Amino acid sequence: MIITLKKGAPKQEIEKLHRHFEDKGLKVSLIYGDNFDVFGLVGDTSRLYDRDILANEWVANVQRVSAPYKLANRMFHPEDTIVDVGGVKIGGTSPIVIMAGPCAVESKEQILRIGQEVKDAGASLLRGGAYKPRTSPYSFQGMGYEGLLALKEAGNAVGLPIVSELMSADKIDEFAENADLVQIGARNMQNFDLLKAVGHMKKPVLLKRGMSATIEDWIMSAEYIMANGNPNVIFCERGIRTFEKYTRNTMDLAVIPILKERTHLPVVIDPSHATGSWSLIEPMALAAVAAGADGLMIEVHDKPEEALSDGAQSLKPEKFHTLIEDCRKVAAAVGREIA
Ligand code: PEP
Ligand code: MN
């Protein structure tokens, strides 16, 4: 970290800062210039927050040389993290994992029926929301605990581990008991109390990108979970808000190589939420596989026009089957396979 002081910074202020940085366990070099003095800090600066340093009236500028995250940082953990989700491995050179199912669990019959369809088509994980974060309070809010139990039952029946969204810490016990992968939704990506709470869980976490989160914000949220004791975090890109209206969100595929360079955690792409349209899912899924995604999350519904949420971005089972077959070809072209 490089800290530039303002011209004429008093000696006692410089000494105070020097001691402060040394107390943080950092190696401190001070370069005296003709116009300003500059501190160079070497060591673990992840516990220093740039804006706190700027609170000193004699500090002109703070520049980070290394990233503010440590546990998620590839530099300190060169090998890929492989996350085990109920026996399914995600990350590294593991086969690409397809998570699929309806946006929401609507009934026991519905999730069992769609669960069987996605299993037959080749999915490795069954998804389904039991607690739904809806923009309108008048929209279907999910079946709650009953929905989670129905998802678990369907997963058991068809032989697939399950993933579902945890919206608040008061439901942690339900998820610890029943979910194989705990999804933190886009709207909760910076709910820090919830991140700390899942940090204490033993279950792996699928961390969706907040709709206006930078990549660094997102990695810092993974760091929250890891700093609280849970190393099993998977990133899930689900599109960000931009000025574009043709798609529900703008799918940011560059996150795959960027996250893989900066972190060691697996990256999953959700083209359903990222585009909002069933017709865009397959091309975007193929692009994600070509770009090195470790997994895909796809919404599938057998009667999209009757779906209680996100029908427009759900594939029918036949189309989902074709998508997997096509993904196999692209995966083979980049030296990978689909689980
Ligand atoms: C979902 O997966 O159904 C969902 C609500 O996702 P997101 O948090 O990405 O909007
Ligand atoms: Mn959805």
Image (cartoon, grey):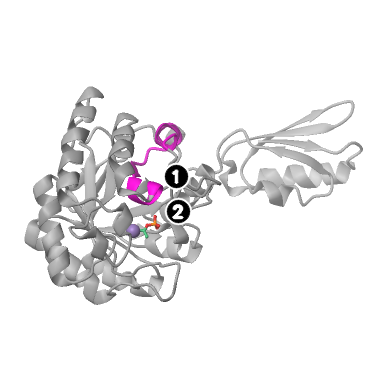
- Give, as a single range, the part of the protein colored magenta: 253-275
| Mark 2: amino acid | Ala
Q: CB at mark 2 closer than 8 A to ligand 1?
A: no
| Mark 1: amino acid | Leu
Residue at 19% in and 66% down: 151
Does residue 160 show up? Answer: yes
Disc 2 to disc 1, how far (Cα)?
Answer: 7 Å
Q: What residue would you read off at disc 2?
A: 227
Q: Position of residue 135 (x, y in %)?
A: 45, 67
Residue in the foreground of this view, choosing between 38 and 318: 318
Residue in the foreground of this view, choosing between 10 and 263: 263
Q: Is residue 329 left or right of residue 211?
A: left
Q: Position of residue 5 (x, y in %)?
A: 81, 38
Q: Are marks 2 and 1 in contact (CB under 8 Å)?
A: yes
Does residue 339 show up? Answer: no
Dot placed on the residue nearer the N-terminal end, 2 or 1 = 1
Neighbours of disc 2 within 10 Å: few (<14), some (14-19), many (20+):
some
Q: Position of residue 98 (x, y in %)?
A: 22, 45
Q: What residue would you read off at disc 1?
A: 71
- Which numbered marker is on residue 203? none
State whether residue 72 is above or below residue 202.
above
Does 325 appear in magenta?
no
